[in-house]
């Protein structure tokens, strides 16, 4: 029996969380089982199964279905027997062996003057009497299990999708805030340069008045150019906005099995740009905005860790 693909098992729009839960039940020959699927975030697929012995033959197919439906995450699959109907038993007695054992024990008892052995001693021999319970049909068990597993996976996927939508909305709101902070960096940079020029001119004028030297306008211009180059954040904000645009695109409705890993990479790249902006910061107001940007970015990275 083939596993349903993620494409046919239900359309997924936008980001999907790795946190989910689903359960379903199935019954075969009076035996009722409960199937539970739990999923949390993990870098890859980490699947752990807890199945009763009679479902061991179904495990490989179950793993295939889970991988196709969920993709990534730490997934726990458990199946518990909730109730079992009485099943027919077959009693097998090794009559020939029993007679031979009893004759040998009777002879031994006579030789040593002991009482003749009874059935209780014979039954303790182990293999004389065997009781076998009628086994459940393996094909019927697997078929019922796969149906319940698919239901549980569908419920898990729906929960992951709903939480993924909430994650996406939260990340988009934080990206909007990052955009606002970048705009503030861009607006603050010229003012910081103007303030620096005013302070530098004031210091030089003080030196001129104190020591009677001439103001070297060429040297002043060179110093201002160097400062402007060191404090200019245009390249960083342009690259950061490019990463934000890519972020928003990845949070769209398209299918992407590597969405979470791509978002994690973009978050790292955004972090590099913010760190560079922080190293160029020459103003207390900008410094506070850098702190706010890093806090916002860290929250985004935490959310991204749970996206498939």
Image: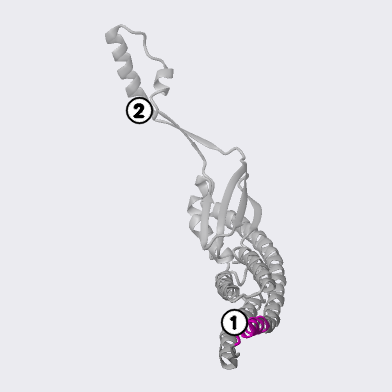
Asked if residue 288 lies in the magenta stretch, the reply is no
Reading the chain from its start, which is encountered first: label 2 or label 1?
2
**Residue identifier under label 1:** 239
**Count of number-bearing discs:** 2
Local packing at callout 1 (Cα closer than 10 Å; few below 14, some 14-19, many 20+) is: some
- Residue 47: x and y in percent read 52, 56
Quadrant of the image occupied by residue 112: top left
Residue at position x 55%, y 73% in the image: 272
Q: Is residue 140 visible?
A: no
**Residue identifier under label 2:** 96
Q: Main secondary structure of the magenta part?
A: helix
Residue lying furthest top in this view? Answer: 113
Q: What SS does tag 1 mark?
A: helix
- Residue 187: x and y in percent read 71, 82
Tell me the magenta residue range: 198-212
Residue lying furthest left in this view? Answer: 111
Q: CA distance from mark 2 to mark 1?
A: 88 Å
Q: Front-most of 81 and 86?
A: 81
Residue at position x 55%, y 60% in the image: 42
């Amino acid at each position: 029996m083939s596993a349903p693909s993620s494409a046919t098992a239900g359309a997924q729009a936008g980001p999907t969380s790795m946190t989910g839960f689903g359960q379903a039940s199935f019954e075969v020959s009076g035996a009722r089982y409960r199937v539970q699927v739990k999923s949390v975030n993990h870098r890859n697929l980490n699947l752990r199964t807890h199945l009763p012995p009679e479902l061991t033959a179904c495990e490989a197919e179950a793993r295939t279905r889970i991988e196709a439906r969920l993709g990534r995450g730490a997934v726990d699959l458990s199946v518990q027997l909730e109730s079992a109907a009485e099943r027919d038993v077959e009693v097998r007695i090794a009559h020939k062996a029993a007679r031979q054992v009893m004759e040998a024990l009777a002879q031994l008892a006579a030789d040593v003057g002991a009482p003749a052995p009874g059935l209780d001693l014979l039954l303790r021999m182990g293999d004389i009497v065997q009781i076998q319970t009628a086994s459940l049909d393996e094909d019927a068990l697997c078929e019922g299990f796969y149906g319940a597993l698919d239901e549980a996976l569908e419920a898990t996927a729906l929960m992951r999708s709903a939480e993924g939508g909430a994650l996406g909305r939260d990340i988009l709101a934080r990206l909007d805030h990052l955009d606002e902070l970048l705009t503030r960096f861009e607006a603050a940079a010229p003012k910081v340069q103007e303030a620096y020029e005013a302070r530098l001119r004031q210091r030089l004028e003080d030196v001129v008045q104190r020591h009677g030297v001439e103001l070297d306008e060429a040297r002043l211009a060179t110093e201002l150019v160097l400062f402007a180059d060191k404090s200019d954040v245009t390249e960083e904000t342009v690259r950061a906005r490019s990463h934000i645009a890519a972020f928003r695109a990845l949070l769209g409705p398209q299918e992407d099995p590597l969405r979470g890993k791509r978002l994690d990479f973009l978050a790292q790249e955004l972090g590099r740009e913010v760190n560079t902006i922080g190293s160029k910061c020459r103003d207390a107001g900008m410094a506070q905005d850098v702190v706010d940007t890093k806090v916002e970015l860290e929250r985004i990275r935490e959310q991204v860790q749970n996206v498939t």
